[in-house]
Image (cartoon, rainbow, N blue to C red):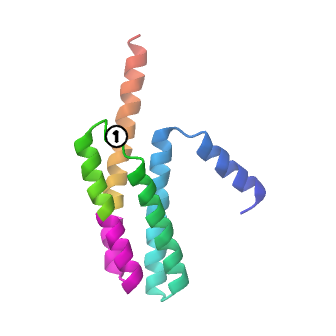
């Protein structure tokens, strides 16, 4: 990646809203899961490990960012899903199991789609509240 592209990427992340960063984390996780699955299919162990570790790190970041003080039930459910995803990634890494990657892809894809809807609803509510002022 060129210097300009790196600078642009860094700036876009540091100036992004919390919601956009959340979506970017999911996008990065899903991208790395797909690349890990491809590496498993190609029997490319170093690439498999690299992408599983990146997806793992993103899921850990998502886990660490959970706010249990606001909606503790939702935070606990997300934490359980993330914990399961991490255990599946460990299994996938140890056994080169593409099915384990698929199960994590399904979870993260479903959550990503849900967050997209939630972010859009939040934007609509914000716009509606601004119009009523």
Q: Is residue 50 left or right of residue 86?
A: right
Q: Position of residue 91 (x, y in %)?
A: 34, 78
Q: At x 43% / y 77%, what residue is drawn? A: 37
Q: Is residue 12 left or right of residue 48?
A: right
Residue 24, relative to residue 14: is it above or below?
A: below
Can residue 58 be seen in the rendering of this structure? yes
Question: Which quadrant would the C terminus be assigned to in this image?
Answer: top left
- Residue closest to the eye, 16 or 93: 93
Q: At x 32% / y 70%, what residue is drawn? A: 87
Is residue 1 covered in magenta?
no
Which of the 4 quarters of the picture holds residue 110? bottom left
Q: At x 37% / y 53%, what residue is drawn? A: 112
Residue holding disc 1:
118
Q: Position of residue 66 (x, y in %)?
A: 37, 46
Chain part drawn in magenta: 84-106
Residue 39, relative to residue 57: is it above or below?
A: below
């Amino acid at each position: 990646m060129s210097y300009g592209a790196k600078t642009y990427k860094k700036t876009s992340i540091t100036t992004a809203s919390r919601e956009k960063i959340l979506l970017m984390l999911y996008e990065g996780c899903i991208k790395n899961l797909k690349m890990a699955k491809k590496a498993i299919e190609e029997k490319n162990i170093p690439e498999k490990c690299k992408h599983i570790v990146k997806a793992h790190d993103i899921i850990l970041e998502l886990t660490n960012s959970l706010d249990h003080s606001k909606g503790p039930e939702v935070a606990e459910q997300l934490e359980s899903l993330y914990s399961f995803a991490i255990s599946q990634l460990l299994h996938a890494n140890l056994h080169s199991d593409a099915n384990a990657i698929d199960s994590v892809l399904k979870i993260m894809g479903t959550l990503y789609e849900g967050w997209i809807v939630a972010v859009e609803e939040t934007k609509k509510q914000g716009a509606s509240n601004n119009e009523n002022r």
